[in-house]
Image (cartoon, rainbow, N blue to C red):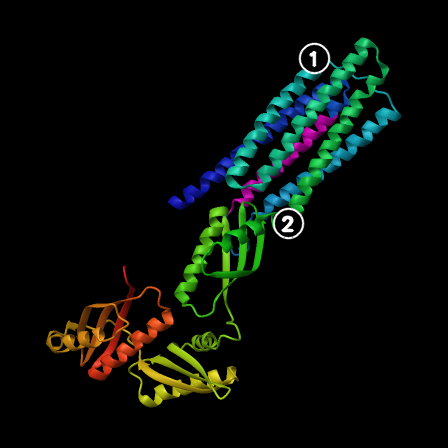
């Protein structure tokens, strides 16, 4: 219930400012018609016609805002936001029709028929009232439009802001006409229809701008600059290799974003989901009302990277592998890897799975001549372990002696052994030269692990944590 009340607040504010615009347009239309008929000013009558169209446009905007704020339903899964763009399109069409009439009448008065215009104080008064009201309502509409990203209200605001400029031109035309009557300057008598033409020209220009924007929205053209801003935000998210596709469409105040991203091929599903979540958050930082759909696709490893391609094959077939190595023998590549399987499997079933993995690798990588799979039980739960006190007294001294006999190790500390069932888990911390290459460090720790197992076959697992000296 609280959520629905929160959603109703922006809708009420948008409808309120749209309704005020309707009332203001009705007042100005009435005033301009009365004063225009009394003075005979085509400029004012053109403004009256313009305000009449404003009234219709404001009514259409009010209706569209009410409909567009309805939540999405089964018939309109993307919501009703397109109604706002449709209303802006109707406004554009009405404005262009009005401009055509104003231009036609102005040309008639300039070249074919003379009409007496009386620039009375009432004419100036109604135009100044129009300018004041239009300024206030265009600012109010712009404020709410920007606050809620409403294109219908923004179009309405832009529409009424042009009224301020066109009304100013009409006032200038009336002033020039008054000067022509007072100073007897005949050529200034055409100021009123010329002002009407200028008003029509301004309106046509703005109408075409509005028309292009509304048509772009109706045909799902991407808002200008949106894709570029999203691409820039995506590029800063760690884990995204590149974006393959960015599709954007606007519907009312909502932005719908469809992304296709390339991620590393051999990362876990949880890691991929984390990257996708960070991308979505980055997009919503720029566009809070964005509805983001992301498709993440793995990037195929380079053809020269045999190890990564093997891992990719294993992951696609839902196999957990580690310690993948590849080496060339007589022009062919030999592969060895460790495969983790359910410890409850019988040997026959486990061997069948290992054979299937071997077959997948051989069929997809013709350069591989032989695959050797070492099967290991997958540890699926936390085992209860007791510190191996009896083992420590006899084993730890020998483990330390073996480790300290390794010349590459600077220091050895924190040796621990834990009993898990019939097996022993050993952990050890050691320090090495910080400038040693990682591959060399791995070789040293592997050799140390081998010597530990040789001395104590009951050891199930050895974890060696290598640290750089000085850390």
Q: Which residues are magenta?
A: 46-70
Please determine whether, in this image, residue 184 is positioned above or below residue 228: above
Check disc 1 and report the residue beneath it.
Answer: 121
Percent of width and height locating residue 9: 45, 39
Badge 1 local density, few (<14 within 10 Å), some, or many (20+)?
Answer: few
What kind of secondary structure does the magenta stretch mostly adopt?
helix
Q: Residue furthest front?
A: 407
Q: Residues within 10 Å of mark 2 (few under 14, many from 20)?
A: some
Does 59 lie within the magenta span?
Answer: yes
Is disc 2 placed on a helix, strand or loop?
A: helix
Badge 1 marks a residue whose secondary structure is helix
Residue drawn at point x = 23 percent, y = 79 percent: 452
Report the residue that reaches farthest toward the top: 182
Q: How many marks?
A: 2
Q: Which residue is mark 2?
A: 218
**Quarter of the image that includes the N terminus:** top left
The reply to whether callout 2 and callout 1 are in contact (CB within 8 Å) is no
The residue at the point 47 percent across, 83 percent down is 361
Residue furthest bottom as drawn? 348
Q: Where residue 360 appears, x then y in whole percent?
A: 47, 83
Q: Is residue 319 above or below residue 58?
A: below
């Amino acid at each position: 219930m609280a959520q629905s009340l929160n959603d109703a607040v922006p809708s009420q504010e948008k409808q309120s400012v749209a309704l005020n615009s309707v009332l203001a347009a009705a007042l100005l239309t009435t005033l301009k018609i009365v004063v225009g008929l009394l003075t005979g000013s085509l400029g004012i009558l053109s403004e009256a016609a313009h305000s009449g169209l404003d009234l219709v446009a404001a009514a259409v905007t009010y209706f569209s805002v009410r409909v567009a704020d309805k939540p999405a339903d089964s018939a309109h899964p993307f919501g009703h936001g397109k109604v706002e763009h449709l209303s802006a399109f109707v406004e554009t069409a009405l404005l262009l029709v009005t401009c055509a009439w104003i231009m036609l009448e102005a040309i008639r008065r300039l070249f074919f028929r003379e009409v007496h215009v009386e620039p009375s104080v009432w004419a100036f008064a109604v135009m100044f009232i129009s300018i004041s009201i239009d300024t206030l309502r265009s600012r109010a509409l712009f404020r709410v439009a920007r606050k809620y990203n409403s294109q219908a209200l923004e179009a309405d605001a832009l529409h009424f802001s042009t009224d301020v400029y066109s009304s100013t031109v009409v006032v200038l035309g009336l002033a020039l006409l008054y000067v022509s009557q007072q100073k007897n300057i005949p050529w200034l008598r055409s100021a009123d229809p010329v002002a009407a033409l200028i008003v029509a020209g301004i309106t046509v220009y703005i109408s075409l701008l509005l028309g292009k924007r509304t048509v772009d929205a109706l045909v799902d053209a991407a808002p200008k600059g949106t894709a570029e801003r999203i691409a820039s935000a995506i590029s800063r998210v760690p884990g995204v290799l590149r974006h393959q596709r960015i599709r954007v469409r606007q519907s009312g105040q909502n932005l719908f974003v469809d992304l296709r991203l390339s991620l590393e091929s051999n990362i876990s599903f949880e890691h991929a989901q984390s990257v996708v979540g960070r991308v979505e958050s980055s997009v919503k930082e720029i566009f809070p009302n964005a509805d983001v759909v992301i498709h993440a696709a793995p990037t195929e490893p380079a053809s020269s990277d045999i190890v990564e391609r093997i891992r990719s094959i294993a992951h696609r077939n839902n196999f957990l592998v580690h310690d993948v190595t590849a080496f060339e023998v007589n022009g062919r590549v030999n592969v060895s890897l460790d495969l983790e399987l359910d410890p409850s499997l019988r040997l026959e079933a486990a061997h069948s799975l290992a054979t299937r993995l071997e077959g997948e690798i051989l069929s997809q990588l013709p350069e591989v001549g032989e695959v050797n799979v070492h099967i290991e039980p997958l540890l699926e739960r936390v085992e209860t372990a007791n510190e191996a006190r009896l083992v420590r007294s006899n084993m730890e001294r020998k483990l330390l002696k073996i480790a300290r006999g390794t010349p590459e190790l600077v220091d050895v500390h924190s040796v621990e052994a834990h009993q898990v069932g019939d097996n022993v888990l050993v952990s050890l911390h050691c320090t090495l030269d910080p400038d040693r290459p990682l591959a060399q460090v791995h070789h040293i720790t592997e050799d140390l692990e081998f010597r530990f197992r040789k001395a104590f076959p009951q050891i199930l697992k050895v974890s060696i944590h290598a640290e750089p000296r000085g850390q």
